[in-house]
């Protein structure tokens, strides 16, 4: 999408420069068009990177107004971002209530992302991700990166859900290591202290036979 927009902008700027510069020197005209298109590409790239820095990335822990599942309200909660879409992010809510007796929650280590309690929390992993509009993220920066072991649990749960419905499995969209490498990059960036860019209760087995759970589609977590 960004590539198409960039190509359109560069083409429009090059045509505009051709109309502005009226000369018979084709070398000069081509050079000016290339310079204008290149400057447009640089400015566009900087704008996109600035915009991306303000948006949550998969594998990060944020503080946001997370909607309830049983009513049309929201409350501040920590959450793990598992996907980004137009206008909202898909998140899994983190809770401080003990959920050791439930198989759809896993313990998530507190590695500095919650400086208030300093205790471990629990992450919903077998439930449908919740949609949080970008405007409902309460801070301009994430709390930190999701622990690597927890991120692998999220990925493994998704793999099991897809294995339960092999007929609806989507074709591979790329090397499976891409998302893992992306998350490792997020971890490294947070360890270095910087960040630079790349409502139902349906459970894992709650889908109709032969169909993959809807919440497993479109995730950026590698299969």
Image: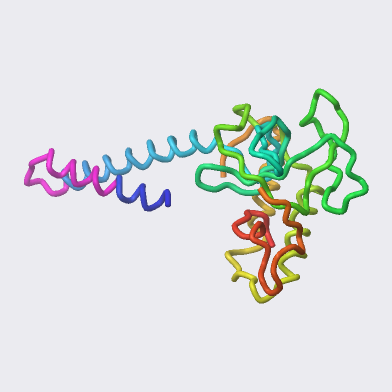
The secondary structure that most of the magenta stretch takes on is helix
Displayed quadrant of residue 143: top right
What residue sits 76% from the left and 49% below the top? 151
Residue 47 drawn at (x, y percent)? 43, 35
Name the residue furthest front. Answer: 71
Relative to residue 120, is residue 39 drawn left or right?
left
* Closest to the observer, 110 or 7: 110
Q: Is residue 178 magenta?
A: no
Q: In the rendered image of this protein, does residue 10 appear above or below residue 156?
A: above
Query: Which residues lie in the magenta part?
Result: 10-27
Total marks in image: 0
Residue occupying image coordinates x 67% and y 36%: 66
Q: Quadrant of residue 74?
A: top right
Q: Is residue 93 visible?
A: yes
Tell me residue 102's x, y (percent).
Answer: 88, 50
Q: Residue lying at the far right in this picture: please name it.
A: 101
70 and 126: which is toward the camera = 70
- Rendered location of residue 145, percent (x, y): 72, 39
């Amino acid at each position: 999408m960004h590539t198409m927009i960039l190509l359109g902008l560069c083409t429009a700027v090059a045509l505009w420069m051709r109309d502005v510069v009226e000369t018979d020197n084709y070398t000069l005209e081509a050079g000016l068009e290339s310079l204008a298109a290149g400057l447009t590409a640089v400015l566009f790239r900087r704008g996109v990177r600035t915009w991306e820095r303000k948006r949550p990335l998969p594998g990060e822990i944020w503080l946001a107004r997370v909607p309830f599942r049983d009513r049309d309200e929201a409350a501040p909660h920590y959450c793990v971002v598992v996907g980004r879409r137009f206008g909202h992010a898909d998140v899994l809510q983190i809770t401080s209530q003990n959920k050791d007796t439930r198989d759809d929650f896993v313990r998530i280590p507190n590695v500095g992302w919650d400086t208030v309690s300093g205790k471990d929390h629990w992450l919903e992993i077998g439930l449908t991700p919740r949609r949080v509009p970008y405007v409902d993220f309460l801070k301009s920066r994430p709390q930190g990166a999701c622990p690597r072991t927890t991120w692998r649990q999220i990925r493994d749960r998704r793999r099991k859900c897809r294995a339960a419905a092999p007929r609806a499995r989507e074709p591979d969209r790329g090397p499976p290591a891409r998302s893992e490498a992306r998350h490792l990059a997020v971890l490294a960036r947070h360890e270095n202290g910087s960040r630079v860019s790349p409502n139902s209760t349906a459970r894992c087995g709650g889908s109709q036979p032969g169909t993959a759970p809807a919440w497993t589609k479109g995730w950026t977590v590698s299969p």
